[in-house]
Image (spheres, rainbow, N blue to C red):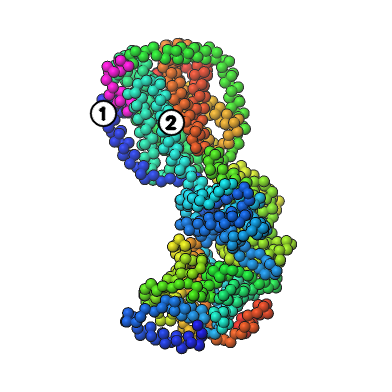
Amino acid sequence: MHLSRLKTVRPLLFLLVLNCVPGEAIFAEPDAAKLVADSLQAFYHAGKDMRAQVTMRLINAQGKERKRVMTMLRMDTGERGGQRYYIHFQNPSDIRGTTFMVWKHLEREDDRWIFIPAIKLVRRIAADDKRSSFVGSDFTYEDVSGRVADDETHTLLRTEEIAGRVTYVIESEPKERADYKHRKSWIDQSHGLPLREEFFDARGEKVRVFVADQIELVEQHWTITGRTMKNLQTGHRTQARFDEIKYDIGLTEEMFTERYLRNPPRKWIR
Amino acid sequence: MLKRVIEQSMDSPKATLAVICLLTILFATQFIKIHIDTDPENMLSADQPDRVLYDGIKKNFTIHDLIVFGLTDEAGAFRPATLEKVSRIIDGILLIPGVITDDVVSLTTTNDVTIKEGQLEVRRIMREVPETLAASEALSGTIADNPLLADKLISADGTGIAVYVPIVAKDQARRIGSEISSLAGRELTEGQKFYLAGLPIAEDSFGIEMFIQMGIMSPISGMMIFLLLWLLFRKMTLILPVMAVAMCTVILGMGLLIGLGFTVHIMSSMIPVFLMPIAVLDSVHILSDFYDRYPGIGDRRETLRQTMDALYTPMLFTSLTSSIGFASLLLAPIPPVQVFGAFVAIGILMAWLLTITFIPASIMLISEDELQVELGKRRGDGSGMNGKLQQLGQFAFNRAAPVSILAVLVLAVGFWGISRTVVNDNPVNWFAKDHELRIADRVMNKLFGGTYMAYLVLEGKADDDMKRPEVLEYMVNLQRVLDTDPAVGKTSSLADIIGQVGYVLHDKDVRWRKVPDNQEELAQYMLLYQLSGNVGDLDKFVDYDYRSANIWVQMKQGDNRIMARVQHRLLEFTRANPPPGDISLRWSGLTYINKVWQDLMVGGMLKAIVGGFIAVLVLMVILFRSVGLGLLSMLPLTFAITMSYGLAGFAGKDYDMPIAVVSSLALGLSIDFAIHFVQRYRACLIETGGDLERANQMVFGETTRAILRNALVIAIGFLPMVFSPLGPYRTVGVFFALLMIFSSLTTLCLLPGLLRLTHGHLWTVGNGVISTSGDN
């Protein structure tokens, strides 16, 4: 999926959906795989690049919370689904300056680096698991950076109205063994973003629930600015807020290198 | 008024039996509400400070109830074929409902962080099953290099692999355990064994064993008593009522307990076992007396009247004293023990009421002709026993001084034995030695870090206190001290996690396996650890505010005295090296909790037994209207308790929960014989106008026969309990026998002589003293 194409398709789709909701039945059933692919595009690939101030609240079963504030930079590399992430922690103060970088690849393991300011050390991290926790939260790397539509088979179950929005309910099943057996997503028919996702394990038990708490229009991109992931087994949940979002700020690949890991780009990171 | 009840039951025997049967059925219907509680935490009341702390710790550090699965392979577990099986078993475990899959700690679900050529590698410990033996062994080496995993996931000798399975609720432990068993059973071949350990499994097993006990062992004891009664009385229509009284008492007592909403705990499950012999005692006295009188009178109504007249007071007092003995348990601050004491106390009074109505009523239902035929010819029966008893009575009467001296010596030996008593308990030891749980306990504790968990909690005053380097340094020192105890198999803490991160981060340089000297570095290591994927792990060691931290102390033995030793060792260290700043230390965890309630129990039981002893003494003084007689009548009880506990001390039997509770039984049961003996002795003395020797001869007739019969029935009747699968029941079985032997021996051998020696000095009877049987 290319960004240029999306830009033209998106408003069209938007209008189309707005117009046709009551009389949906007259259209042929949409292709589930295409709906998911479009949704992933809208969710994770809006704009060429972006910057956001992310506040994560990690809340345990007793309601105690740990807050982490970070700046997140993201750019799409242009290769299929490839992305670069740069995360700079600001809060709590004792981890201030810790930076974390991910080169996301579709076809192979991601590359990750961490810079530990207290000992001024950069280490590259090899990890085979895109489904492990993202910086200790209930979100996985995939939840933050997106999945590949082709990795799952998708079935459109029905349309359903939740919180006053009309959604497609789609069931997706990973083709290869994953941490979930299948997931259900409620994709908003108007802007294509998921309003809710439920993950089921091999026993058929619902284990994690994603909820889009707030969706805003930022520079023409519908963006999920508040989101929660809850682990139903442990009762732990993570709320993430995205503030100060800016799209297409002109990030370059150079910014996602070891040099900037040690010396954050002052222009984007305060 | 109560004597009216006896008359009434003789007047309308059928109605009496019908009412009792109806009541029993009514109470029996309550049994469907039964709720079993085997949680040892409930030995403490819900608001007990140590328990409150433990509940808080479990929540604060997200500690779930665990089932520990262990697999051993004689040929070495680190072989491709075995690892393949382990991997399949883990896959299966993840499919079992009720398992908290996210928190399962195992070779294939837990991450390990290593470093290779300057690159951190975050991988599942066993991402793929190794294909060669060399690769398998390399894997085992990698695990051994991580102190957070070594001795936890694999044994030091490489023959064992463990999987830690957290579960959503304790009451699912047995089901989940059996599903794991069948998974493992399918995979294992020769030389391979598997074990399930962990407290939830033990607790569930306890519940099952309890049912076996209640459903099989108690009825067997009942049958045994029945058999003995038949041998002694040989008349079915007379002993069936005795059994019926015992049964009804048990049903009424348990029905009341369950109906009132109390849970059946390990303690209260023993109520039937305690009520049965007590319910039988009075009936045996009635039957004995009836058998003796009937041939001479020939009229069942008149015989019963005389029998009940003679026995009413002693039966009332023996029931009251037994009841008080158990009610004294209310002084022990352990809720299940209090419930047990209260309901046995109530049950005893119900048994008494049943005995004085049911037995006369059912005798009234037997036709006079039948009794004439049966009992008329039995006059001479037991004459052999009679003769022997008379001889014994004569001997004890005449040789008062030597018998007394011997008694003092014996008592001294008893006290010596008591002084050797070791106070100790371990609920796992309540199971038989060959029980699969005991076997799993032995094997798992040999191979791994230890299955008995205690927690040493460091509590700070402010958030982030646990990020202070000096606090973590202190943690390391505490662990060093704890590790010196041979029973401590493994300790783990936040300091270990941080040390491991530093070690790996610096290319496995052991100099970096230490606590950094600044908070920033510490915090960044923790963040890195969380990035490695084992997110929940950190929470097990430090709370969300970094205000308190938790050192996991794994012990290979769960005995309370071992816990006390470890505690003491730590205390010595902390006295000399107090924690930095505002940090305070507190122990918790089940191994510690067990010790807490034991301490409460020992103190509580001492209070209970002293309180009970005084109460019984007061009752005796009231009954005999003589301080001297009251004191004398306490002798059999004193001997029974001293000798039973003395023997336990010599035998090396730990003073544990079951043994402590039996002391109330001793109070209640051992006084009975003395009451019957002294009461009759006094009555005879009045009858004979103060002839001590004649009175002694008279008592060594029916009364002593009844005492011996009772001692026999109870001592032998409860022997089957010695084969019970649960330790507490075995203890009770043995103690029933011991108490009966010692209290009957003391009554028959010591009292005659002492009564003679002290008459006129400590007590008198005759000059204007009215016989108590005369008041009735």
Residue interval drawn in magenta: B357-374
How far apart are the alpha carbons under marks 1 and 2? 29 Å
Quadrant in the rendering for residue B133: bottom right
Identify the secondary structure beneath mark 1. Answer: helix
The residue that disc 2 covers is B221
Q: Is residue B167 left or right of residue A128?
A: left
- Looking at marks 1 and 2 on the same chain, the residue that comes earlier in the sequence is marked by 1
The residue that disc 1 covers is B14
Depth-wise, is mark 1 or mark 2 nearer the camera?
Answer: 2
**Residues under numbered marks 1 and 2 in contact, where contact means CB atoms less than 8 Å apart:** no
Measured as percent of width and height from the top left, residue A56 is found at 54, 72
Magenta-colored stretch includes residue B361: yes
Measured as percent of width and height from the top left, residue B311 is found at 38, 22
Q: Main secondary structure of the magenta part?
A: helix
Residue type, numbered disc 2: Ser
Badge 1 and badge 2 in a common chain? yes
Measured as percent of width and height from the top left, residue A181 is found at 47, 66
Disc number placed over residue B45 in the picture, else none: none
Q: Is residue B594 left or right of residue B310?
A: right
Measuring 59% from the left and 38% from the top, which residue is drawn there?
A: B423
- Seen as rendered, the residue at the extreme right is B511
- Can residue B602 be seen here? The reply is no
Measuring 51% from the left and 66% from the top, which residue is drawn there?
A: A177
Identify which residue, B500 or B93, lies in the foreground. B93
Q: Chain of mark 1?
A: B
Measuring 32% from the left and 16% from the top, which residue is drawn there?
A: B374
